[in-house]
Amino acid sequence: MDKIIITVVGKDTKGIIARVSGYLYQEGINILDISQTILDDMFNMMLIADMQDCTKEFGEVADDLRILGEEIGLRILAQKEEIFTKMHRI
Amino acid sequence: MINLFEVRETNKMIEQELLDVRTITMGISLLDCVDSDVARLNDRIYEKITRLGSELVKTGEEISKDFGIPIVNKRVSVTPASLIGAGACRTPEDFVSIAKNLDRAAKAIGINFLGGYSALVNKGLTPSERLLIESIPEALSETDYVCSSVNVGSTRTGIDMDAVRLMGDIVRKTAELTADRDSLGCAKLVIFCNAPDDNPFMAGAFHGVTEGDAVINVGVSGPGVVKSALEKVRGESFEVLCETIKKTAFKVTRVGQLVAQEASRRLNVPFGIVDLSLAPTPAIGDSVAEILEQMGLERAGAPGTTAALAILNDQVKKGGVMASSYVGGLSGAFIPVSEDQGMIDAVLEGALSLEKLEAMTCVCSVGLDMIAIPGDTPASTIAGIIADEAAIGMINQKTTAVRLIPVIGKGVGETATFGGLLGYAPIMPVNRFRCDAFVDRTGRIPAPIHSFKN
């Protein structure tokens, strides 16, 4: 497992999940969990994925997602899982 | 599995509360570079720093991207230069050539600062240590990234007052040589008592002689995160206040631990310590003074400030210690003036004086830090302030330090501007009564007794 966390924050619009999951499918990244909610009037989505079978480096995937976010007017951030598990789990 | 709210909390800390890792500092031993010829010594130093440090900046940037956490500085600390140059340097100019060489090496590997142009003289000065100290003003005025520190006392040895007196002169000369830049040279010079060997923060970082060949030390930050957490517990009891600081410090430190372990693994250099310090910046919301205000003070410096800072410093340690496998360095809360907008405001409004800052250094992690004083302050007065601060450290078995900037050509009511993370500072008044006859005495202050603790 090579888990990454993708967060999407911004104004709700059609096709956000389709665009993000389409990209992940294309790169061979497997989605493990998706959750979403509206917080402070903003669309918040978190997606946990496994990039074990992805041939691209993490940095490239993070850049691709950031650019995809800019195209659809949202902020998409990819981070390796450890920063969250370290902070929130003993 | 991690949930949306936990992810959101972490990212809010980074994006809105300015959580960052302040520095990855690689400590490099230069003991094996020692030579009797200055040119050969410099060649060896340059080769070793650029070899071991070549991937430091790139690795820091990669880790930053992987975890989405800013890593503000990448730095190197080296063995105190007074030891490395002892066999080769015959004049202060020889030592200046080492400083320039260190500056070249720092620029070659792209780091932000290099510390270790230092001397440890808490019990006495060797000839080479005296030469290095005499070279400090020129070394700091002719380099960009080199930082210098001098340890003048310790709880075990007492205080070397000959070194204290000398440092009063050296601080003034450093200020004079950089007078065209608001005496910026003094921002790169720290005078310590009980200096730690593994501090990753500048300007006081050096690689102690008891350390290994190379080591990775990480300094965290995060005053904004603590302040935001305290906003939610206004009016609650001290128990709730302390628990909130502890929990927040734990989370902040875990990020430092992760970054330190990753940097150590990727660079194949052993992990040394995480320094738990709350390090402010001039950015709004990234302020230790604002934490004190959030605890209930109208302004930093008001009655209650020392107590509030004592709580903060202690709870940060209590929360952080469990979050990291090795804690070291300075670990606590920094209270620089120029680097903290809340401190600057407190000075401007007349809430915070040099004397109150001195009291605060009894309970904070370091000492009188980044304080601009009038350019006509006598060297003996600066030495007196250094002696006071060293005495606090010696008696209380803690690290204390002095980083004063006598701003040549400026006086109280004016402002010194240093730029970047060093910020700007209103010039503070200094007690005008003299201490010449005290600091002119030669010799040492004996080590204190530590049996009768009342």
Image: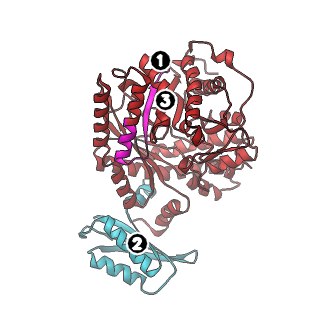
Chain colours: A cyan, B red
| Residue located at (59% from left, 25% from top) | B168
**Amino acid type shown at disc 2:** Arg
- Camera-nearest residue between A75 and B362: A75
Give the number of the mark in front: 1 or 3.
3
Up-down relation of residue A66 to residue B67 (above or below)? below
Look at mark 1 in the image and give the residue it sits on. Answer: B125
Q: Secondary structure at mark 1?
A: loop
> Which mark is drawn over residue A66?
2
Q: Is residue B69 above or below residue B346?
A: below
Q: Which residue is mark 3?
A: B136
> How many angstroms separate mark 1 from mark 3 (CA)?
15 Å
Q: Quadrant of residue A25?
A: bottom left
Q: Position of residue B335 (x, y in %)?
A: 60, 42
Q: Tell if the residue under mark 1 belongs to the same chain as the one under mark 3.
A: yes
**Residues in magenta?**
B101-123
Q: Quadrant of the N terminus of chain B?
A: bottom left
Answer whether labels 2 and 3 touch (C-beta < 8 Å). Answer: no
The 10 Å Cα crowd at callout 2, few under 14, some 14 to 19, many 20 or more, is some
Left or right of B184, for residue B38 = left
Kind of residue indicated by mark 1: Leu
Is B246 a magenta residue? no
- The span from disc 2 to disc 1 (Cα, nearest Å) is 57 Å
Q: Is residue B117 in the magenta section?
A: yes
Q: Earlier in the sequence, mark 1 or mark 3?
A: 1
Q: In terms of secondary structure, where does tag 2 sit? A: helix
How many neighbours does mark 1 have within 10 angstroms: few (below 14), some (14-19), or many (20 or more)? some
Q: Position of residue B342 (x, y in %)?
A: 66, 50
